[in-house]
Image (cartoon, rainbow, N blue to C red):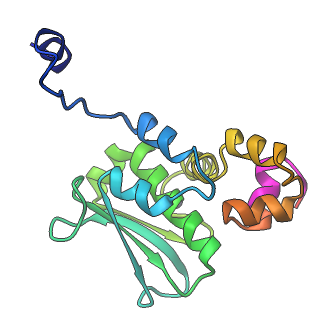
Amino acid sequence: MSVLQQQIQNPTTPAHIPQSPAQILAKYHSLAPVDVMGLAKELGLSVWGTHSLPSSISGKIFRDSANGGSSGFSIMVNSTEAPVRQRFTIAHEIAHFLLHRHLLESKGALVDDTMYRSGLSTAEEAAANKMAAHILMPFSLINSLSNNGFNSVESLARQLQVSKTAMKIRLGIPT
Ligand SMILES: [Zn+2]
């Protein structure tokens, strides 16, 4: 019997219906700036900021049975980089987790350099960047901010805590 069937037959018992990543993401797209740390945690990922990564590395996602979240994975982000950059890195690693879980499971870790190259294909990295942009800059939030007077690249970037370059790319404006 499915959880939903149990719930229908016994409506006084709250059913625990697992949320899909898309449902979880939708919740985080109601408020600017997107709470990328909360999102990671709810997806089962621990996030660690560290000064110990080499300057050539922006972040990584790796199997972490000791300290990882409920998924068994952690994200480590280079905290010497700018806060808006760290947010993008976390979103990029979340994107790898959602898009490339099978590769992550087999490799055990994906380590991204400052160009967000982790050894996956260019197409896979581009897909991760595109999803990271969607995570941090959903068009629903851009539109509602724009309707509330935040019309410039600078003001939208500030409201969503992303770099101006990232916002320009999202809006299709030449950088
Ligand atoms: Zn990557």
Q: Would residue 62 be visible to someone looking at this image?
A: yes
Q: Nearer the viewer, residue 144 or 124?
A: 144
In which quadrant of the rendered image does the N terminus lie? top left
Would residue 107 be found to the left or right of residue 89 on screen? left
Would residue 170 be found to the left or right of residue 121 on screen? right
Query: Total label count?
Result: 0
Q: Where does the image place residue 44, in percent across and percent down from the top left?
A: 29, 53
Residue drawn 49% across the image and 59% down it: 36
In which quadrant of the rendered image does the C terminus lie? bottom right
Q: Does the magenta stretch mainly form a helix, a strand or a loop? A: helix
Would residue 163 be found to the left or right of residue 55 on screen? right
Q: What is the span of residues highlighted in magenta in the rendered image?
A: 166-174
Q: Is residue 74 magenta?
A: no
Q: Is residue 34 above or below residue 68?
A: above
Q: Is residue 133 above or below residue 85?
A: above
Q: Where does the image place residue 53, in percent across and percent down from the top left?
A: 44, 85
